[in-house]
Image: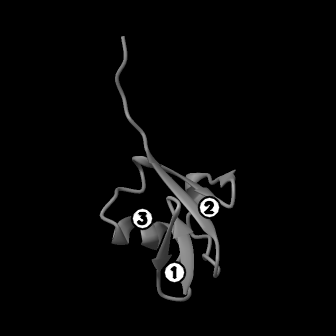
């Protein structure tokens, strides 16, 4: 099935959830923030099964600053 991942079309297997997608892309689910269809998910919601056409944005949590 196709989703929109970080503004690019991506083919993923049907039934994949957010946590599986993040791990498949070699990111640590603890260090990223994930938004699906404009809604920021809590870590507890990463078992959310993705649907055809979902818009997923993944952002790395970066530390630092002054």
Q: Nearer the viewer, residue 7 or 63?
A: 7
Name the residue located 36 percent from the left edge and 29 percent from the top edge. Answer: 63
Q: Is residue 25 above or below residue 1?
A: above
Which callout, 3 or 2, points at the residue further toward the start of the chain?
Answer: 3
Which type of secondary structure does the marked residue at label 1 adopt? loop
The colouring scheme, among rainbow, by chain, secondary structure or one colour, is one colour
Q: CA distance from mark 3 to mark 2?
A: 13 Å
Which callout, 1 or 2, points at the residue further toward the start of the chain?
Answer: 1
Q: Which residue lies under the disc numbered 3? A: 22
Q: Which residue lies under the disc numbered 2? A: 45
Name the residue located 30 percent from the left edge and 64 percent from the top edge. Answer: 26
Label 1 crowding class (10 Å Cα cut-off): few <14, some 14-19, many 20+? Answer: some
In the rendered structure, the answer to whether residue 18 lies left or right of residue 48 reads left
Q: Which mark is residue 16?
A: 1
Q: CA distance from mark 1 to mark 2?
A: 13 Å
Q: Nearer the viewer, mark 3 or mark 2?
A: 3
């Amino acid at each position: 099935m196709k989703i929109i991942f970080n503004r690019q079309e991506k083919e993923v297997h049907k039934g994949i959830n957010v946590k599986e997608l993040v791990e498949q892309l070699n990111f640590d689910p603890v260090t990223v923030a994930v938004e699906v269809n404009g809604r920021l998910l809590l870590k507890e919601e990463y078992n959310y099964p993705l649907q055809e056409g979902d818009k997923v944005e993944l952002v790395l949590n970066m530390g630092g600053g002054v």
